[in-house]
Image: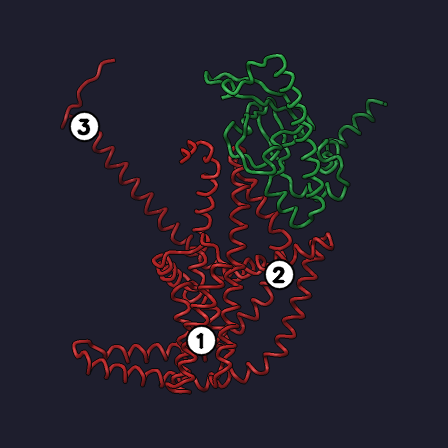
Amino acid sequence: MSSHPPTIGGPADRKQMILLFLVLTAGLATGLAIYSSASSFITMIKTASAVLFLPILLSLVLSFLLEPVVSFIERKTGNRISSIFIVYTLCAILLYLLMQLIIPQWQSAWNSLQADLPRYVTGMISYLKDLGLRIENEAPFIDTADLVERGRLLGKEVINAVIVSTPQSALRIGGLFLIVPLFTFFFLRDGSRILRSCISLAPNRTFEMVHDLSYLITRQLSHFIRGRIIEATIIGCVIFIGLSFTDIRYTGFLAVFAGVTNLIPYIGPLIGMVPGILIALVDLGIGGQFWWIIIVYFFIAQVIVDNFILIPVLISRYSNLHPLWVIIAIVLGGNVYGILGMVIGVPIVSTLKIIFVEIRQYRRTFSLSERLPEPEP
Amino acid sequence: MNPLWKNIFYKKIEDRSIAYFLGSVSIFSDLDNRSRMQLESLMHLRTYNAGEVIFETGDPGSGMYVIRSGAVKIFNRTPKNGEIELAHLGVKEFFGETTLASPSKRTASARASEPTILIGLFRADINELAQRNPAVAYKIMLSLSRVIGERLHFSDQIMNELRQKHPDLFTPEAIR
């Protein structure tokens, strides 16, 4: 086979250049067309998923929570569907009793909170003003004018969110009360079948591995979700009991808020204690009760109960995230789905980490025998 | 029997459920109908072309396969890319059961020697069954341990015979 050196600047070279130019132009045009259609497609999917995202997510969490109870009853009855109905009936009775007990008190507390909220915000702004003045005296080179303004805007936003969007969110929650139990029922009944039909799409050679991995990942995920929910509930209860010793108002709301924000590691507990400390500061002032509240939030709930007892017992070290990942998850989640995204961003990243760690663990399990045995000392 | 009737009956048996088929497989024959129905909901039906590899030696193993139709060749590969056939299995026979109880690598390769349908039962499925219905899971594991015990006993017998015939093969140096 003979090979000729390419002639630079010759007619053949020019032809190649024109061809390259045409191909590049066509590629660019195709890329732009795909991008524009893809972005509208993504917008469409985003709009559709925004409606279904929350109910599906809540149903998945609820089905992970109820799964052990359903399995336990199924062992006795031998029938899955009747076991789910028994669990649903028990939950409905529990919910009804809880509502009978809580709703009248919470209704009045909620109404007075709506009235009190502007007062607390004013208190926060005046506290920020004081803080600004103090900083100006101590360190005049720091510009503090922004601090008060930002506090005022934040307060305004909170009041708007609570007063204006309460009826809207009540409507949405009402809708969720219908959709979530329905979805949960189907996830509990057909969850494993849905997963199996997804796994069956895997090619024959990888099917066995995919099946095994999906089981391991689902097991870890259910432990993680159950652990986090139980942890948040216990923290909420601890804060409720701790705050009940003081004269602070809205103990129930504060405990629920602290419990929910506790789902976000590192930053969540700090956000969770802000309203409690603010209300304590405005209503009770700095004194014995105020310091007790600080101790309940920081020391009892976070350090003793959460870090020393709950996290080692309930949460696997697999799902522990580096603080940097937590911040990235919160920022990204917040950008995509707002406040809801901030709460669920971290669990989603933890889920991805669990999947990654399980795959690595699985690979390691089956390459163990390939390693040479360690020399005995 | 009239060939026409025989044909109809034969077709009917082929079309019957996996639960019915499992009753004729020795490892599941002790289970009652209800348990087999429950087991059916956990099993995976996989279709293989002739010559398609099911698993290779060293693959992560997580369960067993029962041959519903077709045939499977179990073999070991030689260093020079040859194959040593260990077994040729047909309908109602099963393989890979040793990895059902604990995770380990496949010790031989398996390939479909003709278009084959396999029923797979894996460790994850048994674990799920143990959560929901421990009695059935117990029965299956008992049958499984019986089969593995029988096979171990059989291979022990062969080993003993070999040891008597060729004692030089079983010295510690030779084993090493």
Where disc 2 sits, the SS reads helix
Image point (62%, 79%), residue name? A101
Q: Chain of mark 3?
A: A
The chain painted green is: B
Give the mark, 1 or 3, whose residue is nearer the N terminus. Answer: 3
Question: Compared with residue B6, is residue B134 higher up or lower down, i.e. above or below?
Answer: below
Please tell me how crowded label 1 is: few (under 14), some (14-19), or many (20+) other residues with Cα within 10 Å: many
Give the percent coordinates (x, y) of residue B27. Answer: 71, 33
Q: How far is mark 1 from mark 2, CA to CA?
A: 39 Å
Q: Which residue is mark 2?
A: A182
Disc 1 versus disc 2: nearer the observer: 1
Quadrant in which residue A108 is drawn: bottom right
The tag earlier along the polypeptide, 2 or 3, is 3
Q: Chain of mark 2?
A: A
Q: How much space separates mark 2 and mark 3, taking CA atoms?
A: 67 Å
Residue B5 on image: x %, y % = 83, 26
Q: Which residue shows up at 38% across the image and 66% down it? A: A267
Name the amino acid, label 3.
Asp
Chain coloured red in the rendered structure: A
Q: Nearer the viewer, residue A90 or A321?
A: A321
* Residue located farthest toward the right when viewing the structure as drawn: B1
Residue extending farthest to the front is: A377
The relative height of residue B144 versus residue B85 in the rendered view (above or below) is below
Residue carrying label 1: A296
- The three-letter code of the residue at mark 2 reads Leu
Do marks 2 and 3 share a subunit?
A: yes
Q: Are marks 1 and 2 in contact (CB under 8 Å)?
A: no
Q: Does residue A78 appear left or right of residue A202 in this picture?
A: right
Give A11 or A275, whichever is nearer the viewer: A275
Which residue type does callout 1 highlight? Val
Q: Residues within 10 Å of mark 2 (few under 14, many from 20)?
A: few
Instruction: Please tell me whether residue B99 is drawn above or below residue A146 in the rendered image.
Output: above
